[in-house]
Image: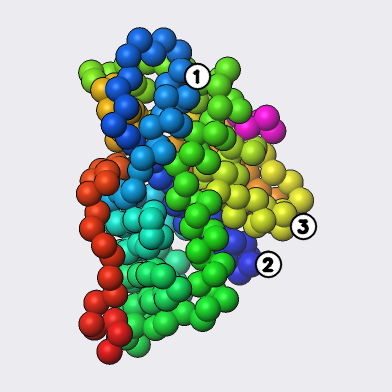
Amino acid sequence: MIKSLKVVGVALVFLFLLSACSDEVATNLTDAEDVLKQSLVAMEKLDSYSMTMESDQTMTINDTETINMIMKIESDMTLDPMAFYQKLSLESDMEFMGTYETEMYLVGDQMYMFEPMMNEWMELPMDMVEEMGSLSEMQLSPDQQLLMLRNFVEDIKLSESGNEYVLKLVGEGSKFMELAEFFGGAGGELGGMLEFFSELELNKIEYEIFIDKTTLYQTKLNMSLDMNLAMEGETVHTIQSMKATIHGYNEVGEIKLPEEVLN
């Protein structure tokens, strides 16, 4: 049972949160809903972006065993055509994991991942490519994120920091579980994993997004999640924090498969 909880816990660490931009100019935005609406309009011109993200997660199993994981992601993505390059590193004090580093390309209907233990690139099966493609479309869609936030607009506080709007949401309890599943589980993937647990308790979720006042580019986002999960007498207390910066809007060139990947 403990092993199963560890596997699920490892899966919880994988976050893919993104944002968007455009040439629109924001003026006289007075509340959170105004900012969200303007950002949704702005995203229509988004062609590409780059992102860096760091996630730190601590899981305590049955109040006796603690597992720490740190994940870092650097990625470039184009939306038309859909393609991405991603470099990922994962550090954990779990005995069977340690440090893991990999790279991944998705170009057209081909997906390749570098396998460090074999020191070679592997082409993933087409059915996995199709699954990842549809998942990525949801995960990496900035309008999906802001549309989700609009469902909680009454709970979002708007402030300003220099040349940026700051939207912040803090919540707890079942009302915000949908939000926790979405942002804490890559667009709903966590929701499927949560079905394995008979008891869920959201202690706290904080989500903070920074939007440039002039361009409406979303420049940074922070999230923290505190949740208890239980099943058949076993419990997992997970605390997760994530920080991401989004940059290089509409500046990413064509993503191609390098020769070393194809050879």
Residue 1 badge: 2
Q: Is residue 14 above or below residue 112?
A: above
| Residues under numbered marks 3 and 2 in contact, where contact means CB atoms less than 8 Å apart | yes
Mark 2 lies on a secondary structure that is loop
Please name whichever residue, 131 or 38, is drawn nearer the observer in this view of the structure.
38
Quick one: quadrant of the C terminus?
bottom left
Badge 2 or badge 1: first in the primary sequence: 2
For label 3, the residue is 232
Q: Residue 134 occupies which quadrant of the picture?
A: bottom right
Q: Is residue 112 a member of the stretch shown in magenta?
A: no
Q: Nearer the viewer, residue 249 or 12?
A: 249
Which of 235/187 is in front?
187
> Which segment did they paint magenta?
171-176
Between the C-alphas of marks 3 and 1, the distance is 42 Å
Q: Nearer the viewer, residue 169 or 144?
A: 144
The answer to whether residue 150 is above or below residue 13 is above
Snapshot quadrant of residue 214: top left
Residue type at tag 1: Glu
Label 3 to label 2: alpha-carbon separation: 9 Å
The picture places residue 94, in percent across and down from the top left corner, at 45, 66
Q: Which of marks 2 and 1 is in front?
A: 1
Gap between marks 2 and 1 measured at Cα: 44 Å
* Mark seen at residue 259: none
